[in-house]
Image (spheres, rainbow, N blue to C red):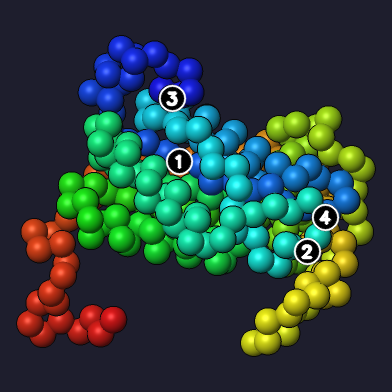
């Protein structure tokens, strides 16, 4: 079910056939001079919509804002603090749980490390709080980067580069305004910087010149397949009886 579109009786029936819900997390964030601010939201929603149609799991409306650190001084980036994102994720899972859902997929189209780790942190709290749930946190960009390696020509492709440009060219070509110069920003190793634009002029990480709509189609399919696989793994997963809280005697798991 696409939850935005169903009625109350349809929801009631739907939750009896599957209790898995996917919650997409995007961002309103600069993506260079050529891609729209909604790039991350667009990509994740389109992947999740295809996943929902093919599997019968339920798709929740997207959270269209995220935690954006490196790009926060670039024009157009409007984001949340980690505390707010964490609270939103927790509230949504709690309320979907109250409405009968039991398996949760928090899937992010925005690959920012702090953003994804905030979702992981919220997920850990939810596992403690709700003993009958299963939960995954997926960064669909990271999944594509790994699974789509063979399709990507450029080195170290990331934000608004070959992958994202290809995907928007496939999904919403009318939103792609030409291209932007290739860029590989260098931020200091440990020191946090205020003037982030000084280190990242154009807001691109990679080379958009290698992008194509056909590559975008294939990358989208790869993301859909990979997310379906991860959802199946989640649904098949059975917890150990003590939730793994105490290591067995002689266990070598030190962490
Ligand atoms: Zn992005």
The quadrant of the rendering that contains the C terminus is bottom left
Q: Quadrant of residue 37?
A: top right
Disc nearest the viewer among 2 and 1:
2
Disc nearest the viewer among 4 and 3:
4
Q: Position of residue 100 (x, y in %)?
A: 24, 32
Q: Earlier in the sequence, mark 2 or mark 1?
A: 1
Q: Mark 4 Cα within 10 Å, few/some/many (few <14, many 20+)?
A: few
The alpha-carbon separation of the residues under discs 3 and 1 comes to 10 Å
Residue named by callout 4: 75
Q: Is 220 rendered above or below residue 146? A: above
Q: Is 110 rendered above or below residue 24? A: below
Asked if labels 1 and 2 touch by Cβ distance under 8 angstroms, the answer is no
- Residue at image coords 40%, 64%: 121
Q: Position of residue 127 (x, y in %)?
A: 26, 56
Residue named by callout 3: 3
Secondary structure state at the residue bearing disc 4: loop
Q: Position of residue 229 (x, y in %)?
A: 40, 44
């Amino acid at each position: 079910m696409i939850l935005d579109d169903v009625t109350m009786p349809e929801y009631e029936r739907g939750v009896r056939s599957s209790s898995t819900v996917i919650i997409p997390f995007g961002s309103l964030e600069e993506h260079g001079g050529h891609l729209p601010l909604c790039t991350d939201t667009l990509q994740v929603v389109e992947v999740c919509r295809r996943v929902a149609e093919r599997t019968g799991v339920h798709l929740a409306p997207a959270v269209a804002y995220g935690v954006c650190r490196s790009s926060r001084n670039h024009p157009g980036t409007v984001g949340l603090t980690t505390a707010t994102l964490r609270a939103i994720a927790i509230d949504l899972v709690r309320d979907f749980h109250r409405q009968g859902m039991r398996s949760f997929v928090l899937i992010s189209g925005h690959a920012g490390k702090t953003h994804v780790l905030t979702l992981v942190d919220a997920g850990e709290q939810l596992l403690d709080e709700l003993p009958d749930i299963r939960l995954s946190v997926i960064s669909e960009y990271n999944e594509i980067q790994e699974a789509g390696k063979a399709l990507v020509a450029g080195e170290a492709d990331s934000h608004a580069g070959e992958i994202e440009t290809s995907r928007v060219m496939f999904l919403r070509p009318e939103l792609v305004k030409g291209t932007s110069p290739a860029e590989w920003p260098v931020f200091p190793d440990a020191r946090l910087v205020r003037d982030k634009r000084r280190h990242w002029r154009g807001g691109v990480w990679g080379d958009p010149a290698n992008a194509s709509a056909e590559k975008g189609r294939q990358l989208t399919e790869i993301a859909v397949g990979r997310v379906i696989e991860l959802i199946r793994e989640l649904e098949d997963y059975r917890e150990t009886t003590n939730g793994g809280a105490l290591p067995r005697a002689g266990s070598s798991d030190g962490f």
